[in-house]
Image (cartoon, rainbow, N blue to C red):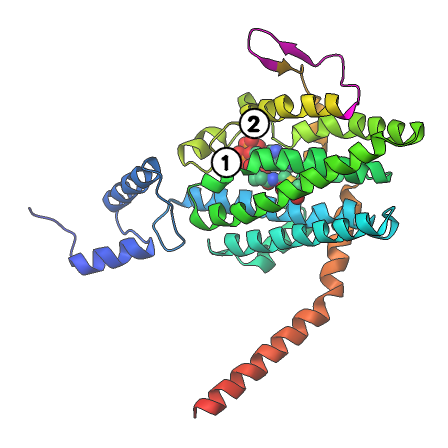
Amino acid sequence: MYTTDLRTAEEKAEEARKGVPRSALDTDALEAEFQARIDADAYIEPKDYMPDGYRKTLVRQMSQHAHSEIVGMLPEGCWVGRAPTLKRKMILIAKVQDEAGHGLYLYSAAETLGTSREELVRQLLAGEAKYSTIFNYPTTNWSDVCTIGWLVDGAAITNQIPLCRCSYGPYARAMVKVCKEESFHQRQGYEALLQMMKGTEAQKRMVQDSFDRWFWPSLMMFGPPDSNSAHSSQNMKWKIKRFSNDELRQRFVDATIPQAEFLGVKVPDVIVKNAETDHYDFGELDWDEFMAVVKGGGICASNRIDARKKALEDGTWVRDAASAYAEKQQVATVAAAE
Ligand code: 3HC
């Protein structure tokens, strides 16, 4: 066969490995091979060929996810000093530390796609990158902290269990440990609420009030309705997403309403079990509120970003010290080898 392509077979293989195809023909072949691997449920690894769009959407989603973990520490972390008992304080400290760890895994996993953690954090602080809308709502009392565990971590698990089978290997593997920890978070929150519901009338009112304020925003964590979800159809083809926003939202409602009933809180009248579908109908969410919060109009939005900026500034000396120590170690290693 005649060809104008002067590369040797070895050069072609090397370029494919590095993900730098030279011609459109090669790109088509690589993309077909890439999609075939995804269709066969193989993992895509950092050095494998991947289309730019796949890389871009993963950096977007994984960094949004990492930012959500880090920002998500704030509404709970501010309750560590006010937890009602030593036991609750210990559990809360462990949970907030877990969220920090999730952020770190996810930033590391996102870095395997070629964008540095410094750049991802810069995008968050500059308002260029999103984080979950849910963390723009305030925690006004202890019951809110427990409700976050039950509903917010519960919604997070529902969304994240399928991510353990995401096509991108480093993301999928990170999610396995994250989901185990989120499961503990959800249970401790629900158990703390069960205790409050055995308490005084004032405690029961606090639980009901928290449920009323957090239930609808927790449903918005799953993203816009499928009809308005810009990325869903491509991301499902790439098996980044395994289920649509609406499917996961429904799954969460179906699991949560029986838990709410067992807990003893009154669920909104609009939520009714549909005998035909065997799912709970819950009506339309307030998508105007969702969009306003996504665009930075949430009650706590500026407070959250200010807190992250301060954390970055306060940690400068730690990063400087770690870099200086690493340099010293490197010099010592080189000197020892000479
Ligand atoms: N908050 C903020 N932005 C949201 C959002 C939410 N709840 N839901 C959707 N969006 C944004 C998307 O990022 C996208 O914005 P962009 O195009 O400007 O980047 C836009 O709205 C359109 O939404 P799509 O449905 O098209 O977007 P996705 O296909 O990415 O789906 C998602 C959204 C379901 C949130 C998906 O990104 C996802 O599964 N992400 C991973 C999980 C995650 O980020 N979870 C954060 C929850 S909190 C958490 O994990 C902390 C834990 O400790 C509780």
As drawn, the residue found furthest toward the front would be: 198
The x, y position of residue 85, in whole percent, is 86, 48
What residue is rendered at 72% in x and 41% in y? 188
The x, y position of residue 180, in whole percent, is 58, 45
On screen, residue 12 versus residue 264, left or right, reads: left
Closest to the observer: 33 or 29? 33
What residue is rendered at 47% in x and 87% in y? 334
Please report contact status of discs 2 and 1: CB closer than 8 Å, yes or no.
yes
Callout 1: few (<14), some (14-19), or many (20+) C-alpha neighbours within 10 Å?
some
User: Is 210 placed above or below 85 here?
Assistant: above
Q: Is mark 2 within 8 Å of ligand 1?
A: yes
The x, y position of residue 65, in whole percent, is 60, 44
Query: Sequence-wise, which precedes: disc 2 or disc 1?
Result: 1
On screen, residue 15 versus residue 3, left or right, reads: right
| Residue with the mark numbered 2 | 248
Q: Report, in whole angstroms, how far the alpha carbon at label 2 lies from the one at label 1.
A: 10 Å
| Residue with the mark numbered 1 | 162
The x, y position of residue 61, in whole percent, is 54, 42
Magenta-span inclusion, residue 271: yes
Q: Secondary structure at mark 2?
A: helix
Span colored in magenta: 263-279
Magenta-span inclusion, residue 165: no
Callout 2: few (<14), some (14-19), or many (20+) C-alpha neighbours within 10 Å?
many
